[in-house]
Image (cartoon, grey):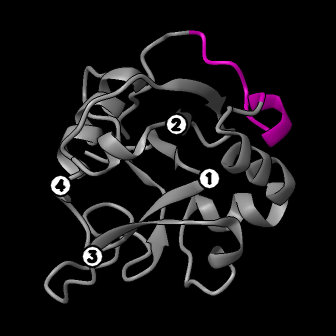
Amino acid sequence: MRQIAGMQLFLVCEGKLLLILRDNKPDIKDDPINGIHFPNTWALMGGGVEEGEDFFQTAARELLEELGIEFQLQILGVSAKGNCYFFAEIGQGLADKIVLGEGQEYRFFNLYELDSLELGGAIKIYLAKYRDIIMKMIVSGKPAQGSQMGLFIWNGGQPNKVV
């Protein structure tokens, strides 16, 4: 089964954005069905929707799998490709409880540090198009309107489609 919907999270703590350095395991192929997408690059936390899940269920599962914590998310919207984007701001106390479950490492970066990183996936695309909006989210700790980032409102239906 191929997943065509996923979720991504803009997670902010004290004016910095969390990114995960994706795995670069030679035994896992980088292919669109079974592999790690954008290996060995810094990316937003996220993952694919599993059968029967909605975006919020996917986000809750991915948070536990990748970071080992739970917190309230705000939906930004859904991209034309069917991926759902969320925003959250957490305090340092919760950030200190993160236990990495996937990827090589995680780190919080300010906007200017992002320029020196090898970025992959959605963050690379969204920074190129919506840098000022993302900067405001990071600095203010408040979500943007999804429409400002080319996102659509999610109607709450099941996003999982299998090809």
Of labels 2 and 3, earlier in sequence is 3
Quadrant placement of the N terminus = top left
Q: Which residue is mark 2?
A: 89
Please report whichever mark, 4 or 1, sits nearer to the chain's N-terminal start: 1
Q: Which residues are magenta?
A: 145-155
**Magenta-colored segment: predominant secondary structure:** loop
Name the residue: 63% across, 66% down: 110
Q: Are marks 2 and 1 in contact (CB under 8 Å)?
A: no
Mark 4: give few (<14), some (14-19) or many (20+) Cα within 10 Å. some
Residue neighbourhood size for the residue with mark 3, other residues' Cα within 10 Å, grouped as few (<14), some (14–19), many (≥20): some
**Quarter-wise, where is residue 64 in the image?**
top left
The number of numbered badges drawn on the structure is: 4
Q: Earlier in the sequence, mark 2 or mark 4?
A: 2
Instruction: State the CA–CA distance, disc 1 to disc 3.
Output: 26 Å
Give the residue drawn at x 27%, y 83%: 24
Disc number placed over residue 64 in the picture, else none: none
Specify whether residue 146 is painted magenta: yes
Cα separation, mark 3 vs mark 4, equals 16 Å
Q: Mark 2 falls on what kind of element?
A: strand
Residue on which disc 4 sits: 99
Q: Which mark is residue 23?
A: 3
Amino acid carrying label 1: it is: Gly
Depth check, front residue: 63 or 1 = 63
Q: Nearer the viewer, mark 2 or mark 3?
A: 2
Residue type at mark 3 is Asp
Residue 15 tag number? 1
Residue at the extreme top: 156
Which of the image's four quarters has the C terminus?
A: top left
Q: Earlier in the sequence, mark 1 or mark 3?
A: 1
